[in-house]
Image (cartoon, helix red, strand yellow):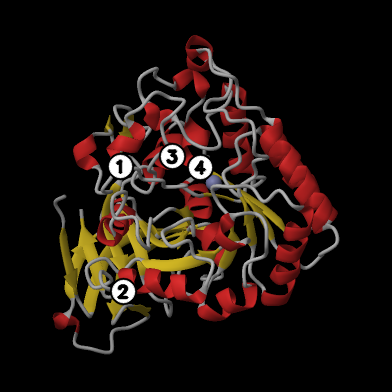
């Protein structure tokens, strides 16, 4: 890892092309005082450090609503500092941590442990971490977690991510809590029991593994929407869609007036089961890579707004859990560092039509979803300055292990050629030069 970072209470960005989801403006001078973009400097302009942004693009920093930071208590997979540094490497300034940790975040006490671990590294990497708590105690799918306690202690979402919630009653209880406590319920849609590692494709066939059924995802989303109709003010979100049928279900539920959203991960956007290499288990993730028709559909659906935003499902694993045959290896790929590279690639290939579209799916929509639009997702005077300076025209280069700042290197884009656009990340008074 090789980057410069500094804390400057006064800086001025010159010649910046600023892209929000709905506009593009050139600013000759952006004055930042104590982390806030001010119309005019109140201090002596000579005191400001100058940063030249000519020929680059300035966007609101990325927001990632699905990250396994492995905090608290899984330092073998990710350390608080490597996780947050990985976010910065990928132009991401705020994220939602998933609760399948050690201990599992199903109580205020477990949440506090996680918060303490993060606090200790915030000076070094001030990425904002939001927390989710579980839907069921110990994610065992048997009894409801203490929703009031969790929300009061500061969780922003409820999810058993890693496992689908099978019981109709427990989903109903979660939706009731969502209505009352104003937090979204995030479903990892997977009917358990199939025991499969890979969806149908060349490697699955060659290894003679049973194909991971589409119904595992689609059936659970269908059931969830049925239960959700009893809770018109609840917010329901489908994590990491892998089948186009899921997106169609979500789209028609939106038309019906239900509060439903969904996300796609960079790997499901860019890759499919035909891209899997036989001996590389970093292509094993849950849900699995499916057909080319699905990934092409997701690209169109993201452009059209049928899919609300991109979230990485960053899932670091130590080498010993991945260095096994496909059937036995752990599920998961890292993603914080490669998400913006994939989105920039889609922009360069005209799959995303404009820089504003990238901003919408990478920053604006996820910030709105997490309720942090006051400080993320949009750049304008008067707001905290959380921004990423990048080059959307950056040439492609191979994703290499040494590029990755996450502690674990299980990234499914390793060896692929993708643009590497991020130059600087601004998080209030703090900035990092890559
Ligand atoms: Zn999941």
Labels 1 & 3 near each other (Cβ < 8 A) = no
**Residue on which disc 4 sits:** 265
**Residue on which disc 3 sits:** 332
User: How far across and down, in percent of the image, does residue 12 sit?
Assistant: 24, 72
In the rendered image, the vertical position of residue 119 relative to residue 101, given as above or below: below
Q: Earlier in the sequence, mark 2 or mark 1?
A: 2
* Residue ID at (41%, 59%): 102
Quadrant of res 150: bottom right
Q: Earlier in the sequence, mark 2 or mark 4?
A: 2
Labels 3 & 2 near each other (Cβ < 8 A) = no
* In this picture, residue 228 sits left or right of residue 428: right
In the rendered image, the vertical position of residue 391 relative to residue 177, given as above or below: above
Residues under labels 1 and 3: Cα distance? 11 Å
User: How far across and down, in percent of the image, does residue 93 sit?
Assistant: 37, 62
Q: Earlier in the sequence, mark 3 or mark 2?
A: 2
Quadrant of res 178: bottom right
Q: Is residue 350 visible?
A: no
Q: Nearer the viewer, mark 3 or mark 4?
A: 3
Q: Earlier in the sequence, mark 4 or mark 1?
A: 4
**Residue on which disc 2 sits:** 119
The verdict on label 3 being within 8 Å of ligand 1 is no
Q: Any mark on residue 223, and which? A: none
Q: Nearer the viewer, mark 2 or mark 4?
A: 2
In front of the other: 406 or 424: 406
Secondary structure under tag 4 reads: loop
In the rendered image, the vertical position of residue 405 relative to residue 427, given as above or below: above
Q: Earlier in the sequence, mark 1 or mark 3?
A: 1
Residues under labels 2 and 1: Cα distance? 24 Å
**Residue on which disc 1 sits:** 318
Q: Is residue 292 visible?
A: yes
């Amino acid at each position: 890892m090789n980057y410069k970072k500094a804390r400057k209470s006064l800086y001025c960005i010159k010649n910046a092309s600023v892209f929000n989801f709905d506009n593009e403006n050139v600013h000759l001078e952006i004055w930042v005082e104590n982390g806030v973009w001010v119309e005019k400097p109140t201090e002596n302009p000579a005191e400001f450090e100058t940063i030249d942004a000519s020929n680059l693009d300035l966007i609101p920093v990325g927001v990632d609503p699905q990250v396994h930071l492995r905090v608290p208590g899984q330092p073998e997979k990710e350390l608080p500092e490597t996780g947050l540094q990985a976010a910065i490497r990928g132009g991401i300034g705020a994220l939602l941590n998933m609760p399948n940790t050690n201990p599992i975040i199903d109580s205020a006490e477990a949440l506090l442990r996680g918060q303490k671990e993060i606090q200790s590294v915030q000076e070094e990497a001030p990425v904002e971490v939001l927390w989710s708590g579980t839907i069921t105690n110990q994610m065992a799918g048997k009894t409801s977690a203490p929703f009031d306690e969790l929300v009061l202690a500061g969780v922003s979402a409820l999810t058993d991510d890693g496992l689908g919630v099978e019981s109709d009653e427990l989903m109903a209880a979660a939706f009731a809590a969502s209505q009352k406590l104003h937090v979204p319920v995030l479903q990892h849609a997977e009917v358990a029991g199939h025991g499969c590692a890979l969806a149908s494709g060349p490697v699955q066939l060659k290894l003679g593994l049973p194909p991971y059924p589409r119904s595992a995802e689609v059936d659970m989303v269908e059931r969830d929407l049925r239960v959700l109709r009893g809770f018109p003010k609840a917010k329901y979100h489908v994590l990491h869609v892998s089948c186009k049928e899921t997106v169609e279900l979500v789209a028609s539920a939106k038309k019906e007036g239900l509060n439903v959203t969904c996300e796609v991960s960079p790997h499901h956007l860019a890759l499919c089961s035909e891209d899997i290499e036989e001996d590389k288990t970093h292509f094993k993730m849950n849900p699995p890579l499916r057909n080319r028709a699905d990934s092409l559909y997701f690209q169109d659906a993201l452009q059209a707004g049928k899919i609300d935003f991109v979230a990485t499902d960053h899932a670091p694993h130590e080498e010993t859990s991945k260095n096994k045959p496909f059937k036995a290896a752990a599920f998961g790929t890292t993603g914080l560092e490669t998400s913006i590279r994939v989105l920039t690639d889609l922009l360069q290939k005209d799959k995303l039509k404009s820089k504003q579209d990238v901003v919408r799916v990478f920053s604006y929509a996820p910030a709105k979803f997490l309720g942090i639009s006051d400080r993320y997702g949009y750049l304008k005077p008067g707001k905290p300055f959380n921004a990423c300076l990048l080059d959307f025209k950056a040439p492609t280069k191979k994703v290499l292990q040494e590029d990755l700042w996450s502690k674990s290197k299980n990234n499914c884009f390793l060896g692929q050629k993708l643009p590497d656009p991020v130059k600087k990340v601004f998080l209030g008074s703090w900035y990092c030069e890559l």
